[in-house]
Image (tube, helix red, strand yellow):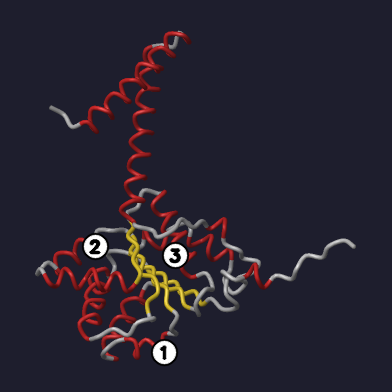
Amino acid sequence: MLPDGVVGSRRIRWSIQAGICKLALQEEASYLDYLAYLVKEEVRGRDETQIRNAFKSARFPVRKSLDDFDFSFQTSVSQQTVRDLASLEFVKAHGNLILLGPPLVGKSHLAIALGIRAVEEKMRVRFWTAADLMQDLYSHLADGSLRRYIQTLTRYDLLIIDELGYLKLDQTASDHLFQLVAEAYERSSLAITSNLDFREWAEMFANPSTAAAVLDRLLHHAHVLSLKGDSYRLRSRLAPPKQTAD
């Protein structure tokens, strides 16, 4: 006996097909036209399901769009540069994206928006904060599946690591991050946001040589954006008050 969810899904599909059949008879469409329309609707339904599942798998904390990014406020990043990144050629080429800058200047917004763009293009994407990623890797170390898990992650087209640099990494976490970056090198794309300048990364890792090895792989094929300025989230508070008529 089929599960209720499967039965319900099939009932919906049969209902849609019945409606299409009725429409075809009303419009006296040819059999081939009807068949082509039926196939088109089936493909569209599967695409929608695939994208919906991909969004769920990506685990974005919020939905962000490039259309919502205020380039007039955040002038340190070029709109044309972001538009070029939105073509996702860097992902197709297994390149990386590093977004640097102080807190609240729009780094996470851009990383998430580009990740959502990638999902819409049927790419596999996974998002973490750096703290969540480290906890995830630790849990797989505990059950002996770390190596296999890291290899699984490199099957994603784009891995987004947000807020790297807010917490200092101990030796184990430093090694874990190096293993992930090394495994992803020229296989998957990494998009990383950090509040630290590259010169400060040595202080984030337990060993400066690990920081150097990570940066060597990250920057070999990378786009680097340095965002500056006031808090992007507080832009509305910084705007001058509207003048009211007397």
Residue 103 placement, left or right of 124: right
- Residue 218, image quadrant: bottom left
**Mark pair 3, 1: CA separation:** 22 Å
Rendered position, 42 above or below 85: above
Of callouts 3 and 1, the N-terminal one:
3
Q: Residues at badges 1 and 2 in contact (C-beta under 8 Å)?
A: no
Q: Which mark is residue 27?
A: none
Residue 178 placement, left or right of 230: left
Residue extending farthest left:
144
Q: Which mark is residue 199?
A: 1
The residue beneath circle 2 is 153
Name the foreground residue: 40 vs 235: 235
The residue beneath circle 3 is 111
- What residue lies at 26% left-to-right and 91% top-to-bottom? 207
Name the foreground residue: 33 vs 8: 8
- Residue 62, image quadrant: bottom left
Of callouts 2 and 3, the N-terminal one:
3
- Residue 35, image quadrant: top left
- What residue lies at 37% left-to-right and 77% top-to-bottom? 164
Element class at badge 2: helix
Element class at badge 3: helix
Q: Residues at badges 2 and 3 in contact (C-beta under 8 Å)?
A: no
